[in-house]
Amino acid sequence: MARLPSRRYLGDVRTLTLAAPALAIFVAGLACHRGGSAPAGAPSSGVPAPAPAPPPPPPALLRVIRLGGTELHVLERGAGIPVVLVHGSLETLDSWRPQIAAFATRFHVIAYSRRYHPPNAVRRDGEAYALSLHADDLIALIEGLGLGRVHLVGSSYGAYVALLVTMRRPDLVRSLVLAEPPIFPWLARTPEGDSLRRAFEATVLEPSRRDFARGDSVGGLRRFLDGVSGRPGHYDALPEAARAALLPLASELRLEIRTDPAVYMPALSCPQVAGIRNSVLLVSGERSPRLFHVIMEELARCMPAEEIVGVPGAGHASHADNPAFYNAAVLRFLMKN
């Protein structure tokens, strides 16, 4: 794909220093909205633990940065080679708390809330919730902060965004970590995948869209979360505080799933993806719904990944469900690259 022109959007910047206990910037306990739970103790023996960590890094710095016509909250911690964390749907920069703490002992960690996600203000800016828009924002962020070449770590839709950025601007990417990008058009490539896609559309996406269209935010959240976790009743089983914490995210999800699928989840060709020459780690949750495993299998077929890791006991949000194993696997990969 054509290389985007270099742009520097960095405008007004407001800073706030946060002590480590204050990393819960917006959604306290947000990680518990995903399926699975983190096992106690050390990571599985399948992934060697990194060497003993150095002393804790300085407190995190939260900035509000203007990029073109929007403002993004950006949290930075640590020093060294930059690692940019890109969150998925129904998430914010705060969804990466376990990774920020672990990765910042060795890297300069940058976590940001994507456009329309809290604590960013929700503005009607005339833009669709398009993959290309989020990729443009991420490119502008990397260039505007003068980060140079970065490690990109993405989860779910954030992995989709990170993948497109790497295809467009490989010069900005040192390595790429992808955890289950929802490239739903790829499901139509096999009978099994197409059947799973149709079922997900009929039982999750369409009912959720209808709920949001009639103003039922709770119903829309319930349908979506139960479907993505693969566990009917998951939303209702959450603690009341966790359900309340999800409500501020309803506006972004409403915008997201009501966007034209052609721009929300565009089809990427296998040859385009195969052209990526950056080092790649593919991550999948052991207990993720089958349709995400089918997408990851197709991604592994198309992409020359350096390493493929399955996270034991984890669902779709493997970084939240089993952070000990996830962190050890990703840190090992990042330190090699």
Image (spheres, rainbow, N blue to C red):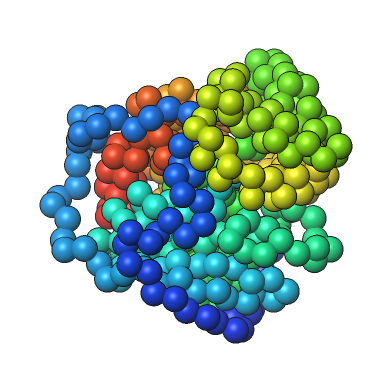
Q: Is residue 146 visible?
A: no
Pick the quarter of the image with the C terminus.
bottom left
Residue, far bottom: 12
Q: At x 26% / y 61%, what residue is drawn? A: 106
Between 87 and 131, the residue placed more toward the observer is 87
Left or right of residue 206, residue 137 in this image: left
Residue 304 image point, x, y percent: 47, 41
Left or right of residue 194, residue 213 in this image: right
Residue, far left: 52
Residue, far right: 214
Q: Is residue 46 above or below residue 320?
A: above
Q: Is residue 195 visible?
A: yes
- Please tell me in which quadrant of the rendered image residue 167 appears: bottom right
Left or right of residue 6, residue 143 in this image: left
Q: Is residue 133 above or below residue 63?
A: above
Q: At x 68% / y 41%, what residue is drawn? A: 269
Q: Is residue 209 above or below residue 22?
A: above
Residue, far front: 240
Between 149 and 303, the residue placed more toward the observer is 149
Q: How many marks?
A: 0
